[in-house]
Image (cartoon, rainbow, N blue to C red):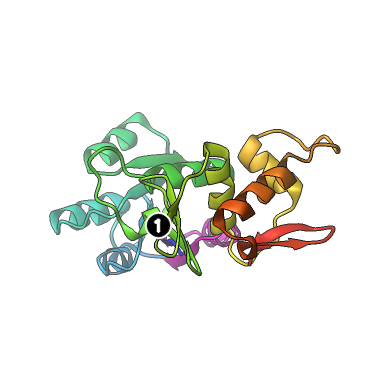
Amino acid sequence: MIRILIAEDEERIYRFIEKGLRAAGYAPTVVADGVKAVDYASSGEFDLLLLDVGLPRLDGFTVLSTLRRAQIGIPVIFLTARGSAADTVAALEGGADDYMVKPFRFEELVARIRARLRPAENGDPSPGNVLHYGVLELNLLTRTVSVGDKTVELSAREFALVEMFLLHPGQVLSRQQLLSHVWGYDFDGTSNVVDVYVRQLRLKLGADHIVTTRGAGYSLG
Ligand code: CA
């Protein structure tokens, strides 16, 4: 499970982010001031930090510079209400990986989070790059899937489908959800492309890993 630390003092905003992240399959934790943000982010227990600029006790810029001085390399996405060019520059120069200007669409936040969890070229593999479910393991960095010790060759679509399941463990995903996330178009009512791909995945991964819930969709088994 990917653990995300939310440092945000405005309840309406952190509730919204927390709820959305949980629904997207992440494990969120909220802290509402800058001192706690430094403590928690230094613990090594989190894969990413969403950091509000205007925090009580220590502002977001100070939190980030404190972390970076202590060689804590956790990916940081700033949440800024101001959206001023100066803040943005300061955030990125201070070692932030990205920033979001409030208010933002939740889908966009998730896209940024996922991008940050896939570090570029020379990034060290971190726990956030590997998703597990039982014997299934998916590595976002190397784009490989394995079942126990066995690495399985998957096409890009098959990989995206497995990723979607692993990001929503224990959740039944409808054909509509799978189509719009993996293929990016609306279900036309006749397409059985999802069923075809699930059948292929069962052949490749083993039949037990994906369970059919009749009339509802599919989930991990
Ligand atoms: Ca704030």
Q: Is residue 125 or residue 82 the one in the foreground? A: 125
Label 1 residue SS? strand
Left or right position of 171 against 43: right
x and y percentages locating residue 45 in the rendered image: 33, 68
Callout 1: 10 Å neighbours few (<14), some, many (20+)?
Answer: many
Left or right position of 128 against 109: left
The residue positioned farthest toward the top in the image shown: 85
Ligand 1 occupies quarter: bottom left
Rendered image quadrant of residue 72: bottom left
Q: Residue at x 70, y 41 (%)?
A: 179
Q: Is residue 177 magenta?
A: no
Label 1 sits on residue: 130
Highlighted range, magenta: 6-31
Rendered image quadrant of residue 170: bottom right
Left or right position of 167 against 151: right
Q: Is residue 99 or residue 58 the one in the foreground? A: 99
Q: Residue at x 39, y 41 (%)?
A: 99
Q: Residue at x 75, y 48 (%)?
A: 175
Q: Amino acid at mark 1?
A: Val
x and y percentages locating residue 144 in the rendered image: 42, 48
Q: Is residue 205 or residue 74 the one in the foreground? A: 205
> On screen, 165 above or below 158?
below
Q: Quadrant of the C terminus?
A: bottom right
Q: Is residue 8 visible?
A: no
> On screen, 141 above or below 126?
above
Q: Is residue 163 visible?
A: yes
